[in-house]
Every structure is written in C-alpha cells, then in structure tokens.
Image (cartoon, helix red, strand yellow):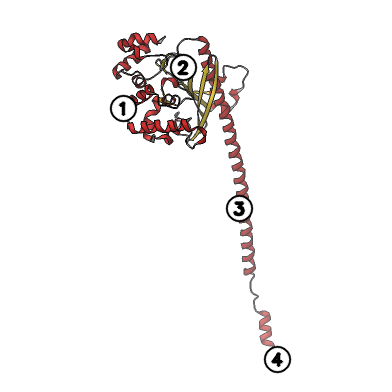
Amino acid sequence: MSWLIPLAQRRNAPRPTALPQRGAALLTAMLTVTLVATLAAGALWQQWRAVEVESAERARVQSHWILTGALDWSRLILREDAIAGGPDSLSEPWAIPLQEARLSSFLAADSNNNASDDNDALEAFLSGSITDQQGRLNISNLIDNQALQPNAHRAFAKLFDLLSLPASQLSTLEQNLLQAKKAGDSQALLPAQRLDQLLNFGLSASTLSQLRPFITLLPERTPVNLNTAPAEVLYASIRSLDMASAQRLVSLRARSHFKSLSDVGQQLGELAAQVNESEHSVTSRYFEVLGRLRLGDNRMEERSLVVRNNSEVQTLWRERGQFQRGPGNSNPP
C-alpha cells in the first residue's frame, strides 16, 4: 500500500493557477482596444481632413467671386471716368486706393442682402488700388519694327543711370528683346508678358526689383502720362530734364493737373519742344488693378491688367497669390 501514498499526495496537492490564461486574455483585450483606437483615430483624421479640404475649397471659391466682383467694380469706375472725359490724373476717383474695410460694410448698402447673418462675410476684409501703367516707362517701347528705338533707349539709359544700375544689363535686355521680336514664335526666346519674365532677358533680380516701380510691360508701344508719372519717370522720359525740374513738375500738377501737353510745355520753357505726342500724353488706357482679400486667416492678392478703349474696359490678364498667416498677423500685406 506504500505506493498509494504518492498518489494520494498528488491528489491532495494544489492545482496550478490560471495566470498564463489570464495574461493571454488581457493581452488580447489590450490588442483589441489598440486596434479599435487606431481605426477610430484614422476615421477621425479622415473626417477632419475632409472638413479642412471642404473649408479650403469654400474659401477659395468665395475669394474668387469676391475678387472678381472687386475687379468688375474697378472696371466700372474706369468706365465712368472715360465717360466723364478729360485727362487722367492722380486727383481722380480711380487713383484713390481702397483701405482695408469689412466686406459687410459694402453689402449693407443693399437692403435685400442677408450678409449680416453670414459669419464669413463679417470676417472678410477687402482692400485694393488702381495704378496707371502709362505713368511708367514701357519696355515695349524699346523695340519698333524689329529695331531699337533711340528715344526709348535714351529714356531707359537715363533711368538706369539715375538708379546706379549697370548699363550692360540694359544692353543685354535690348539685344534679347530684339532677338525675341525677330525670332517670333519659332524660337525659344519669346516676347515677355510679365515683368518677372525679364529675368530671362538679361536683368538680374536686384536690378528688376529697383526698376519695378518705374517700368511696365504692355502689349503695345505707349506714351508716358505726365500727369501720373513719378519724378524719376519724368526725368527719364524728357530728354534734357534734370531731377529738380522733374520734382517741380510733380509739385505743380499736385495743385492743378496738366490738361494738355501745352500746359506741360509752358512749365518747361525752352525744353517744351522735347515733349511730343508720340512719347508723352495726359491720358491713359492701361491700368493695373490690385485687389487684396483677408478671409479669416487666409490672405489672397490678385493683380489684373485692364485696357480702356473709350467706355469699354477689357481685362487682359489676371494673376493671383495666396498667403497663409497666423491669427496674430491681422495687418494687411
């Protein structure tokens, strides 16, 4: 019977606990929770991304229509100015820049709109300006009938000298523009349409930056409007004019704008013969419309070139840029 003792002892011995099974169950539960949390986070991210994309698209469409409306408004101002007639000067309504204003203040004039109930409208701010492009030296004036135009070259040379810019870059620019004009569409060098494209025609970025306030690039040769040109452009466009006399002309027209070229000639005295209708005028046809929109934290800027033929104002091109800023940056660009 002695062999039964070990068996009884084995029967009465404590059974091993179920800790390994409990650990496996706990690990499985943790993995399940982790998987569910991951799937939920992924679904939440996808939903957030869809909302953000929809909001961005909505803001883009709203900005597009608001800036289009601002451009149409500018065209209407220029059209009414053309109907009124007379010379174009900086004392006219189109030359007064629009300071940043809440969009709802414009819509409030219409009693039929419900913009006051739209939070987006309340957070939209609009500003802009109209600039006479014929108050600047036109790059297109440099080339006439596939040849360098001497008077235009002389004007640009005076401007380069005034701004202490290298004359070699002007020479390179003229040669490349002449080559592009002769080559036409069959060559790689094509006539430029934007000032930034002049970087491919021999101008450096620093030179273009200094020239930008005084030059323009229009689709045809144009005279300089002596009513809107800054002193630097007056100095460059009138052959023997010095800078002091150019600044005096700016002061005189601020009190009373020039109604004709003969008015300018009376102020120039013996230099009056250097003012002529082929190079100078007191009216303009080409204008740049700049519109800025701040919609929440998003900022958008649009530039448009328009041409005015009598009472018809046509848009030639539009370009737009968008700038993202934080809530603390509320000042207009």
Q: Which residue is label 1 attached to?
A: 161
Give residue 174's position: percent from left, percent from top.
40, 30
Residue type, label 4: Met
Q: Nearer the viewer, residue 180 or 40?
A: 180
Query: Tags 3 and 1 in contact by the CB under 8 Å rule?
Result: no
For residue 284, the mark is 2
Query: Tags 2 and 4 in contact by the CB under 8 Å rule?
Result: no
Tag in front: 4 or 1: 1
Residue 218 as seen in the image, left or right of residue 203: right
Residue type, label 2: Ser
Q: Which residue is label 4 attached to?
A: 1
Could you give the CA–CA distance between mark 4 and mark 1, rounded to whole angstroms? 126 Å
Q: Nearer the viewer, residue 150 or 272?
A: 150
Q: Which residue is located at x 38 percent, y 28 percent?
A: 211
Could you give the CA–CA distance between mark 3 and mark 2, rounded to whole angstroms? 65 Å
* Mark 3, other Cα within 10 Å: few <14 / some 14–19 / many ≥20: few
